[in-house]
Image (cartoon, rainbow, N blue to C red):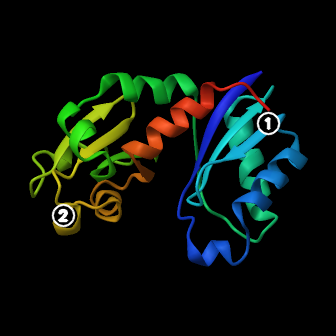
Amino acid sequence: MNRFVALIRAIGPATHAKMSMRDLTDACRHAGFADARSWITTGNLVLATEKTAKEAEVMVGDALRSFGLANEVVIRTPDELAAIVRADPFPDAVRDRPSELAVCFVKDPGRGFDCLNPPTGHERLARVGGDLVVDYVGQISKSKLLPAVIERRTGARLTFRNWNTLTRLAGMATEPAR
């Protein structure tokens, strides 16, 4: 059985009016996932299936479309999440301000992230695999390098989660199916 974490882009108040995370997990179970669990209401699913990552992405996308939504889905394996946690590119940020340390999970890298170096403000950047970790150095509210700007400047398609969410999902992805 393959385990995956599905990170759904742009889940928020507008989408909640059409679909709750409970409804989405039910739709994923109905679509054939052996296990489907959500974490908080921002589009995070832990899934188990015999299918491939690409097939799981399509299945979650189909479940979203059943609610009239076309949000993009980024799939990661438990090993990929664990690798980001192990890399721990900014241990001081993990210790002191994990909610202001973001992981940009990249669906399509666009032109790449070289154009972001050096950052325009206080941010620190690190690539881990194909994803980008951004330490906002305690000033996320003042940053000019928010995810929408990263997308605009690089042409990348991504969704981001803070370090707290990353570590919780990494743990959930290794828990036995219910």
**Can residue 105 be seen?**
no
Q: Earlier in the sequence, mark 1 or mark 2?
A: 1
On screen, residue 147 above or below 59: below
Whether residue 164 sits left or right of residue 174 in the image: it is left
Tell me where residue 32 appears, x and y as whole percent.
88, 40
Q: Name the residue under label 2.
A: 143
Q: Find residue 139 and report its image quarter.
A: bottom left
Q: Count neighbours of disc 2 (C-alpha within 10 A) and say few if under 14, some if 14 to 19, many if 20 or more.
A: some
Relative image position of residue 97 (x, y in whole percent):
25, 47
Which corner quadrant of the image does residue 8 belong to? bottom right
Task: Single out the residue that lies furthest toward the front.
Answer: 96
Q: Residue at x 69, y 78 (%)?
A: 17
Secondary structure under the numbered disc 2 in the rendered image:
loop
162 or 129, which is in the foreground? 162
111 or 42, which is in the foreground?
Answer: 42
Residue 51 seen in this snapshot: yes
Q: Residue at 79% of width from left, 61% of height from top? A: 23
The mark found on residue 11 in the picture is none
Residue 96 at what x, y percent from top left?
Answer: 21, 43
Q: What element carries label 1?
A: strand
Q: How many labels does the image show?
A: 2
> Which residue carries the number 1 mark?
35
Three-letter amino acid code at the position of disc 1: Asp
Q: Does residue 82 sit above or below 63 in this rendering? A: above
Separation of marks 1 and 2 at Cα, in angstroms:
38 Å
Q: Residue at x 56, y 27 (%)?
A: 78
Residue type indicated by callout 2: Ser
Decide: few, some or many residues near mark 1? Use Cα within 10 Å; few <14, some 14-19, many ≥20: some
Q: In this view, does 61 lie above or below 10?
A: above
**Quarter in which the C terminus is drawn:** top right
Q: Which residue is drawn at 73% across and 75% down?
A: 18
1 or 2: mark nearer the eye? 1
